[in-house]
Image (cartoon, helix red, strand yellow):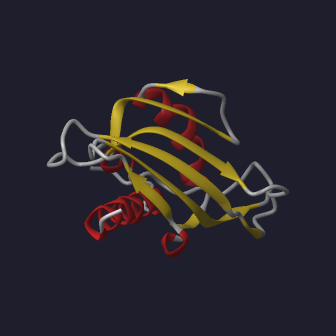
C-alpha cells in the first residue's frame, strides 16, 4: 500500500479514537457512511449510523476513559481501484467496575472503508469492535457527552 494511503487510514483511527475519548458523537458521525453496518461484543448487528450511535457508542463511550488505538500495530490495505480499504487494529481503554475500581479494557477493531473516488475521504461502512477475551463487558464509568 502506498505510504500516503497508510497514513490516511492511520490518521482516521487516530481521529476516531480522539472522538471516542472525548465522547464526541457529533464529530465521530462524520467519519462514517450513513449505511454503516456494525457489531461487536456489546451488540448484535445494527444497520445505519443512527443505530450504531444509539446502540453501541452511547452505551460504551461515556463509561470508559483513555481510549486509543494502538496504531503502531495497524494492518491495513487499499483495493487496487482505491475505493475500498480495511484496517485491523488493537485498542486500549480503562473500564470501571461498579465499585469504581478501574480495570484494563483492551480490544480489537476491524473497520471496512469505502469512498466514491480517490479524492474523497474514507468513510467506515462496517465496524467490528470487540473486547479481548476475559475482559469484563460492562463498564460503570460516567462521563458527559461533548456538546457541539
The answer to whether 74 appears left or right of 137 in the picture is left
- Residue at the image position 23 percent from the left and 48 percent from the top: 121
Place of residue 24 in the rendered image (x, y in percent of width and height, measured from the top left): 38, 53
Q: Position of residue 91 (x, y in %)?
A: 59, 64
Residue closer to the observer: 138 or 43? 43
Q: Residue at x 60, y 63 (%)?
A: 90
Which residue lies most toward the right here? Answer: 134
Residue 51 is situated, as x and y percent measured from the top left of the image, at 48, 27
Q: Nearer the viewer, residue 21 or 126?
A: 126
Q: Nearer the viewer, residue 93 or 130?
A: 130
Q: Is residue 52 left or right of residue 81?
A: right
Q: Residue at point 55% right, 71% down?
A: 73
- Residue 79, placed above or below residue 101: above
Q: Eyeballing the image, is 76 above or below 44?
A: below
Number of disc labels: 0
Which residue is situated farthest in the left direction here? 119
Instruction: Report which quarter residue 59 is drawn in.
Output: top right
Amino acid at each position: 500500500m502506498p505510504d500516503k494511503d497508510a497514513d490516511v487510514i492511520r490518521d482516521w483511527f487516530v481521529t476516531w479514537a480522539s472522538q471516542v475519548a472525548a465522547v464526541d458523537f457529533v464529530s465521530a458521525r462524520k467519519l462514517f457512511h450513513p449505511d454503516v453496518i456494525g457489531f461487536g461484543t456489546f451488540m448484535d448487528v445494527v444497520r445505519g449510523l443512527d443505530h450504531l450511535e444509539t446502540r453501541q457508542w452511547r452505551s460504551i463511550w461515556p463509561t470508559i476513559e483513555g481510549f486509543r488505538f494502538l496504531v503502531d500495530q495497524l494492518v491495513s490495505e487499499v483495493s487496487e481501484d482505491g475505493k475500498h480499504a480495511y484496517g485491523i487494529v488493537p485498542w486500549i481503554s480503562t473500564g470501571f467496575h461498579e465499585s469504581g475500581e478501574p480495570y484494563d479494557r483492551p480490544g480489537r477493531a476491524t473497520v471496512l472503508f469505502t469512498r466514491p473516488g480517490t479524492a474523497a475521504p474514507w468513510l467506515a461502512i462496517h465496524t467490528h469492535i470487540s473486547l479481548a477475551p476475559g475482559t469484563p463487558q460492562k463498564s460503570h464509568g460516567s462521563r458527559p457527552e461533548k456538546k457541539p
